[in-house]
């Protein structure tokens, strides 16, 4: 009765819906995930669709009027989160609006590690039982493990018991035994032909990264990353957390299922690439920020939503992959690296273990900028950490023409100081659609260096320049003219965008400054910039913008995906799991929002590069 | 095309079948489980059905001619395992032929035990987190457990983490924590109103027994037993084992599923009776013979089918109830009591722990007669055990008119020495249908005492008696005349039945004798007869038949379900789990079939009461 049909072009799909449902929910149900930074709150304006017969929809809302221009509204565009459907209708959703979870090869792993993995395999040639020696199979295996290898296991995964008796006899008592932590037998396998692999998982707010490593030789056999499919619930952590708080256990399970499906898809891709079997992945280490950690391990994260934002569990634990529906060997354990606090997750602890050899003498600063900014400062002896609310500007969020670093994003910007000519680089070399994080940092820094911004971040209106123009009461700067862009519209940087970049970089700068002060002053010997952010930004532009305190440019070193590397290190050298636990206890969490120093530093750091710095 | 329809009266059900299927398989598929001792081999003759139009069936086989009389064949009766169906047909399957898995209240538990259960609950009033004390919930709980109760847990069941954050806050940081073995948190619950129960499971070949015990006070809140629904695959262990060997993993899973469904049905019944919730059952201990153990824990038992019949695993282990689909608390562990050998299961080890205080000084003999006979002899210091192939005669198997101890079974028989008058008692007081184990022992013993059997077990033909008659070339004795019985036919004891009872009792006697000899001679101070068998037989009749060696009648003591009691003891006092492990290692298994002494003793013991005994 109240069922209606939505036809979606150019997909050629028909979806059934209930009267009064909004288009975003309908599209999600059909697994068509258009970008939505705010998760359906009606504030980001990203979830645009073109409606072919608008009469079927609820009236245009106030939010849509504000976020869509008249041209867009006239051409039938609506915000899918606000438009409710009341009769059969047709919709146009361009393929390129939709998240396809693009797969990216991960960079090379360049951390040295011992090879003492948690899971090892042992070849045993057993003597078959006789009437005079009627020991059970498992007693026979355990005695042999103990006498040949000095390994004293105390239990067997019950899943092994289904097939082990058959395998042992089929291979004439010549078998390979996989043992976890010298404690538990997790496989009884044929004596040859089976590999032993570990999987490192880095669950980022935006990206899911993975490495598969051969635990017999320490070599990485495949790696890659995809967009975290949870972005359909909102780009940022707070939106996703609120979704769970609102929906309760059901929301948690929904969010968990989406994540695990994404992880399993990536596992599938990586095992095919490496030409191995899922069942050969015998060990897993997972890291992530606190919310991602809680969602992955099905821990209700509601305590993260209210002050003092404590995690439910911080200490490390191990849980069978099958309990998480993770499609690796059924009997494999997933190791959870410890967390520190609500805003300092196991990714940060993992990053510390990844650079442990570098923390020996002089203090280092580790900066990990994902959707949040986590910073660590100190030496092996003494470490401080904090979380800075940078907001999503560095990932293209909260920016008028911001977008993620995908095909069509402007990732490099250069502005000639004299001519004010703009040149830019686009991911994939195609016509640009928007600007991603590294492009925004470039743009703001170059605007400043070109003398178009003053130190407070205001556009200098007096500078004659056709690219600098008024939009409403505010100024904006045109990076790409409409004739160059994909949708024919100018791509600009607005005064508000610049403010958001200033807020983000000031939070980071001030946070680092406070940690250094609390540590007792001095300056970091090196600044390690973790994450793909560190690899992709132009360090000079970021430096001149004033993102990093005190040090010289040469001391700022991009380190790649440290969180993922730490997970790899924990796979290759199980003693690093204890180190992680030790450091999770040792590192002192500094709550920046409670500190008046922080506010002072923050306001100073809003200046470009800093209120007290003069240069250029 | 080749699909046909079978109509079953008086059930009024129609089942679809394939041409050429046998009736037993068809009925099983429809969940109509008629008795079948041989599991479909065509040797027991129990799976009779009446066919209303026999033309639709395959021809009467040789086995059916042998096992069914002419009258039965003429009346349309067939063995359902042998009759194959080729066109639409109708079938008559009396309700009373079908296993209804009757539920029996268990006897009272009369073993004293400490109350130190593996699972304990602790009330904690926690201080909520603040900015200055931002510990995670679990760190808070662990610290509190340690400081208040000295309990240092090292892990949490991940299932707890879903709801714990919500429960903690809902009850204002006042919660009850359930801890397993002072090691793992298995529940975070409201501070009041929830019980803490343990479940003892005794998986017998024929019966599934259960006790639910309150772990806070040690009181049994409900108990009961049902028929093991696996009897549909055959009454005896060998038939079931062969089924799995033939079908492989699929057969194992099928057999497991049937067992677990039966157990869950009984749990359901018992929790309702006790008015508690399944989720309050926080600990489980399971015992059973080696095959039942392997099937319950999904261990491929194929090694039990070939010499030297070794179990796959003997040592104790713990596995989450959810991995076994057992419907108790998701986070509860099921503890597996250790096994000794292929024919000495955890039921025997459990029985030893149940009578541990009695094993202090003088040697005791423990006899557990289920479908097999397991015997243990010795003291706490030194114990021997063995398994005797008694066969199913003591449970009514391999006996012409044998049946299980259910409604309509003759359970007591008395034969007047002078008049040869027979009186008998029937379970439920109705018209008899057959004889169960205790009735058979009575009958054979009474026949002997009445002078109708000689010491070799042969009928004394010369004694004038209208009840003793020829059937074919052999003699049989009428226990109940046709006008007294349910189906109007005489219930008799044949010469072959008597032989089967002699074989069973000789195996038991000789086994016990050998153990006593191996121990160094002497005699047991007491004989403990375990199992419902011990409670139901007439001890004097059994004694006079020569079932128990050496001791006097007064020293033979029925002990009830010792295997189940041992499981209860392991629930109430967790140190008994270590004792069980200790005794599983300590007790020496004696392989009777390899011993020439055994054969000598066995032949002597075939006599009534024994070749070397004279009495009466």
Image: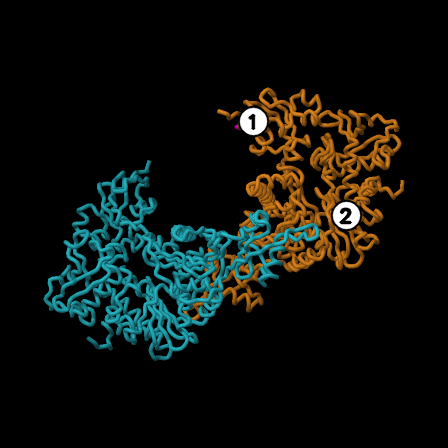
Chain colours: A cyan, B orange
Q: Which residue sits at x=76%, y=39%?
A: B438
Res. B595 mark = 2
- Percent x, y for residue A554? 29, 73
Q: Residues within 10 Å of mark 2 (few under 14, many from 20)?
A: few
- The subunit letter for the residue under badge 1 reads B
Q: Is residue B306 above or below residue B583?
A: above
From this view, report whether residue B469 is shown above or below residue B527.
above
What chain is tagged by disc 2?
Answer: B
- Do the residues bearing badges 1 and 2 touch, measured as CB atoms within 8 Å? no
Measured as percent of width and height from the top left, residue B364 is found at: 78, 53
Q: Residue A59: x percent and y percent? A: 23, 46
Q: CA distance from mark 1 to mark 2?
A: 47 Å
Query: Would you name the residue on which mark 1 appears?
Result: B20
Magenta includes A90? no
Say whether residue B14 is magenta: yes
Measured as percent of width and height from the top left, residue B209 is found at 65, 45
Magenta stretch? B13-17
- A282 displayed left or right of A544: right
B127 relative to B234 in the view: left or right: left
Q: Is residue A121 above or below residue B93?
A: below
Camera-side mark, 1 or 2: 2
Q: Is residue B543 visible?
A: yes
């Amino acid at each position: 009765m109240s069922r209606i049909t939505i036809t979606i072009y150019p997909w050629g799909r028909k979806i059934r819906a209930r009267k009064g449902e909004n288009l975003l929910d309908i599209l999600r149900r059909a697994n068509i995930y258009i970008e939505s930074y705010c998760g359906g709150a009606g504030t980001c304006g990203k979830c645009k669709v073109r409606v072919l017969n608008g009469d079927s929809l609820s009236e245009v809302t106030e939010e849509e009027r504000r976020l869509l221009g008249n041209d867009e509204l006239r051409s039938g565009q609506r915000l899918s989160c606000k438009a409710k459907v009341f009769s059969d209708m047709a919709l146009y959703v361009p393929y390129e609006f939709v998240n396809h979870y693009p797969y990216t090869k991960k960079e090379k792993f360049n951390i040295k590690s011992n090879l003492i993995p948690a899971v090892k395999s042992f070849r045993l040639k057993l003597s078959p039982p006789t009437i005079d020696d009627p020991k059970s199979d498992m007693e026979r295996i355990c005695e042999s493990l103990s006498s040949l290898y000095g390994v004293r296991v105390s239990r067997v995964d019950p899943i092994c018991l289904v097939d082990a008796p058959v395998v042992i006899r089929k291979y004439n008592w010549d078998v390979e035994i996989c043992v976890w932590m010298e404690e538990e037998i997790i496989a009884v396998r044929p004596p040859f032909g089976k590999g032993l692999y570990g999987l490192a998982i880095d669950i980022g707010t935006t990206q899911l990264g993975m490495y598969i490593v051969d635990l017999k030789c320490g070599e990485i056999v495949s790696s890659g990353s995809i967009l975290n499919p949870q972005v359909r619930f909102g780009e940022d952590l707070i939106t996703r957390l609120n979704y769970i708080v609102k929906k309760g256990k059901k929301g948690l399970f929904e969010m968990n299922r989406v994540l695990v499906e994404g992880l399993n898809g990536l596992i599938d891709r990586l095992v095919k690439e490496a030409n191995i079997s899922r069942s050969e992945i015998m060990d897993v280490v997972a890291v992530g920020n606190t919310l991602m950690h809680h969602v992955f391990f099905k821990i209700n994260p509601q305590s993260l939503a209210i002050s003092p934002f404590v995690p439910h569990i911080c200490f490390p634990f191990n849980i069978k992959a099958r309990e998480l529906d993770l499609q690796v060997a059924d009997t494999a354990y997933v190791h959870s690296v410890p967390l520190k606090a609500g805003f300092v997750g196991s990714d940060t602890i993992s990053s510390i273990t990844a650079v442990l050899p570098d923390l020996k003498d002089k203090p280092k600063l580790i900066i990990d900028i994902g959707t949040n900014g986590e910073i660590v400062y100190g030496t092996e002896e003494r470490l401080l950490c904090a979380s800075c609310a940078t907001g999503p500007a560095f990932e293209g969020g909260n920016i008028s023409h911001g977008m993620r670093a995908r095909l069509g994003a402007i990732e490099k910007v250069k502005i000639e100081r004299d001519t004010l000519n703009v040149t830019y680089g686009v991911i994939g070399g195609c016509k640009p659609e928007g600007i991603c994080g590294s492009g925004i940092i470039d743009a703001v820094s170059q605007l400043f260096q070109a003398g178009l911004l003053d130190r407070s971040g205001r556009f200098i209106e007096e500078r004659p320049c056709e690219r600098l123009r008024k939009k409403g009461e505010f100024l904006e700067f045109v990076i790409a003219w409409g004739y160059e862009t994909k949708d024919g519209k100018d791509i600009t940087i607005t005064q508000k965008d610049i403010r958001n970049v200033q807020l983000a970089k000031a939070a980071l700068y001030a946070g680092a400054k406070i940690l250094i002060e609390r540590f007792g002053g001095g300056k970091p010997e090196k600044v390690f910039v973790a994450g793909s952010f560190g690899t992709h930004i132009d360090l000079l532009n970021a430096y001149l913008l004033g993102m990093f305190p005190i040090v010289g440019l040469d001391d700022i070193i991009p380190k790649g995906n440290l969180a993922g590397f730490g997970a790899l290190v924990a796979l290759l050298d199980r003693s690093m799991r204890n180190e992680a636990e030790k450091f999770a206890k040792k590192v002192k969490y500094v709550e920046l929002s409670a500190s008046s120093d922080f506010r002072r530093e923050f306001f100073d750091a809003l200046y470009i590069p800093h209120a007290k710095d003069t240069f250029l």
